[in-house]
Amino acid sequence: MGPWAHGPFTSEGITYPNSEGPDALGTALRFFDHWARGVDNGVPDDPPVQYYVMGDTTDPGAPGNHWRTADNWPPPAKLVGFYFHPEGKLIPEVKPTGEDKRSYRYDPRDPVPTIGGQNLMISMGPMDQRPVEGREDVLLFTSEELAEPLEVTGHIYATLFISSDRPDTDFTVKLTDVYPDGRSMLVSDGIMRARFRDSFERETFLEPGQVCQVTVDLWSTSLIFNKGHRIRVAVSSSNSPRFDPNPNTGKPLRADDETQIAVNDVHLSKRHPSHIVLPIYAGPAPAQRVTAR
């Protein structure tokens, strides 16, 4: 597993050193040499998981930007909740204590435009999200500067406590790495359509003002947030055209062209503490590198 999309990253994003060099290509060729050509090259004895640990590409001394092996995925990690606070802070293991919420208006005819991500035929890769982070329909939660590097490796998900004045709407979550120069580089993202929050096999519509729990899957990553960086989470209701904008009507999907504006709430309270769960790497150190043979 490496830092790739459906093709090379767009130039204005990040390019990770040696991510597609002899480590990745050599491992693939060895695999096919053994299983397709019968070459006795030790492939059956290779570690079952080989993945790239991303890092700060502007600091030559930063940890990361190398290959690692593991016996299983995800590797050992401590699952840490980073909680959203009403003043826009992202704080690990500290829940909010009040009864706050943050609200915004989501208009399907003016969705948040996609900037990077795991895309096909449009810009892809870990691109700077600042052009969309200033929108009124995007909520930001940002950590303090990291005193030491912090590795996040494994499966990421967010738990949102939400309410809306519409029967159906979407909730999106982005995780970004905020560099000292202000760049907010996309790490991973995800979305959940509210009608499918309980099951993809049946629809459960929202009741106006009712607080519900929504889990947003951000898939997996491996990244070391460098010292002096910040961790940021952006919550919204659209990311188009990466995801089809929800018309908020509750009608069967694509039944017509009608749209409605939704007023959506993200709750940040003691009873409803919205947060993201980050797997903080707890495996062996130093990291083992994968090299071609």
Image (spheres, grey):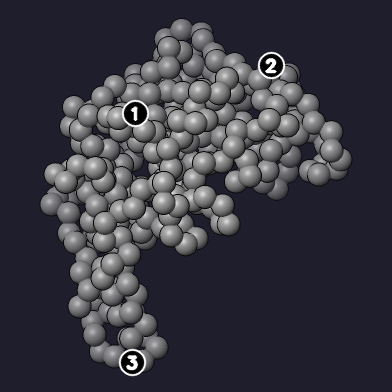
The residue drawn where x is 36% and y is 48% is: 14
State the CA–CA distance, disc 2 to disc 3. Answer: 63 Å
Where's residue 47, x and y in %? Answer: 26, 68
Which residue is the site of mark 2? 209
In-front residue for pair 154/245: 245
Report crowding for label 2: few under 14, some 14 to 19, many 20 or more residues within 10 A (C-alpha).
some
Closest to the camera, between mark 2 and mark 3, is: 3
Circle 3 is placed at which residue position?
Answer: 38
Q: Earlier in the sequence, mark 2 or mark 3?
A: 3
Q: Earlier in the sequence, mark 1 or mark 3?
A: 3
CA–CA distance in space, label 2 to label 1:
36 Å
- The kind of residue on which mark 2 rests is Gly
**Which kind of residue does numbered mark 3 sit on?**
Gly
Q: Is residue 27 above or below residue 202?
A: below
* Placement of 259 over or under 94, stated as above or below: below
Label 1, label 3: how far apart the Cα atoms are: 51 Å
Q: Is residue 163 at all visible to an observer of this figure? A: no
Tell me if mark 3 has few (under 14), some (14-19) or many (20+) residues whose alpha carbon lies within 10 angstroms of its own.
few
Q: Residue 199: x percent and y percent? A: 65, 43
Residue at numbered disc 1 = 182
Q: Residue at x 52, y 41 (%)?
A: 115
Placement of 104 over or under 54, stated as above or below: above
Residue ranking furthest to the front: 11
- Residue at position x 80%, y 31% in the image: 259
Residue lying furthest bottom in this view?
38
Residue 274: numbered disc? none
Quadrant of residue 105 within the rendered picture: top right
